[in-house]
Amino acid sequence: MVTKLTEDERRAALAALPLWTHEPGRDAITRKLKFRDFQTAFGFMARIALAAEKADHHPEWSNVYNRVEILLTTHDANGLSKRDVALAEIVDQAAAEAGAQ
Amino acid sequence: MVTKLTEDERRAALAALPLWTHEPGRDAITRKLKFRDFQTAFGFMARIALAAEKADHHPEWSNVYNRVEILLTTHDANGLSKRDVALAEIVDQAAAEAGAQ
């Protein structure tokens, strides 16, 4: 069973993920990304989909042409868990490599 | 330049797409899909992404695990065009083949 982050863990995690916004209502983190074009945006999504499936932890996300919005939270933990932090780090790396703004 | 459907064309198109809901405000059509699991949902999205890129006409869509919501409209036409009807038909075929509800 995955457990929710403690207050201290959440503070440290958010400090280490400056590109993400915390939504206290759902205890989720969100990031908005802009890519060069649709191909680049969907290529990024495919990479994240593979990582998410491997980790059995999936994002809530939307896409409009070159824009992608991602929300991470852990339903089983009713809030942020280490799984979200791990997936956010993968998102940040893939986004940087894809030249996202 | 892509033109908006006429009233008659819109009526005929909506009648031929019974699984879609018309949103008059944006003159868009939407469909909510549920798949077996994330792999199947994202496999469907990959197929639609390729078709969309080929047609240079892209959906607005979101995904949460095995669920996908799609909105189609043509920004250049400020409403529904033949491009949306064509993409909706591709969505319906791919969704049926992927066993979507």
Image (spheres, coloured by chain):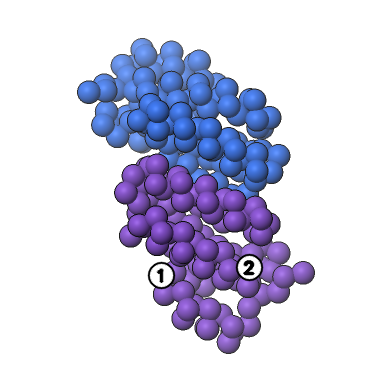
Chain colours: A blue, B purple
Quadrant housing residue A58: top left
The correct choice, above or below, for A79 with respect to B39 in the image is: above
Q: Is residue B93 left or right of residue A96?
A: left
The kind of residue tagged 2 is: Arg
Rendered image: mark on residue B19: 1
Q: Secondary structure at mark 2?
A: helix
Q: Position of residue B93 (x, y in %)?
A: 46, 64
Residue at 65%, 30% in the rendered image:
A98
Kindly give the residue lying farthest to the front in the view shown.
B97
Q: Position of residue A14 (x, y in %)?
A: 46, 20
Residue at 34%, 44% in the rendered image:
B37
Q: Earlier in the sequence, mark 2 or mark 1?
A: 1
Q: Is residue A20 or residue A59 the one in the foreground?
A: A59
Instruction: Give neighbour class at mark 1: few <14, some 14-19, many 20+ (Cα, 10 Å).
Output: some
Q: Is residue B57 left or right of residue B94?
A: right
The answer to whether residue A30 shows anywhere in this view is no
Instruction: Give neighbour class at mark 2: few <14, some 14-19, many 20+ (Cα, 10 Å).
Output: many
Distance CA(mark 2)–CA(mark 1): 17 Å
Residue at 26%, 21% in the rendered image:
A3
Residue at 36%, 12% in the rendered image:
A8
Please name the residue that numbered disc 2 is placed on.
Answer: B83
Q: Is residue A31 or residue A7 the one in the foreground?
A: A31
Q: Position of residue A18 (x, y in %)?
A: 55, 21
Q: Is residue B88 or residue B40 the one in the foreground?
A: B40
Q: Secondary structure at mark 1?
A: loop
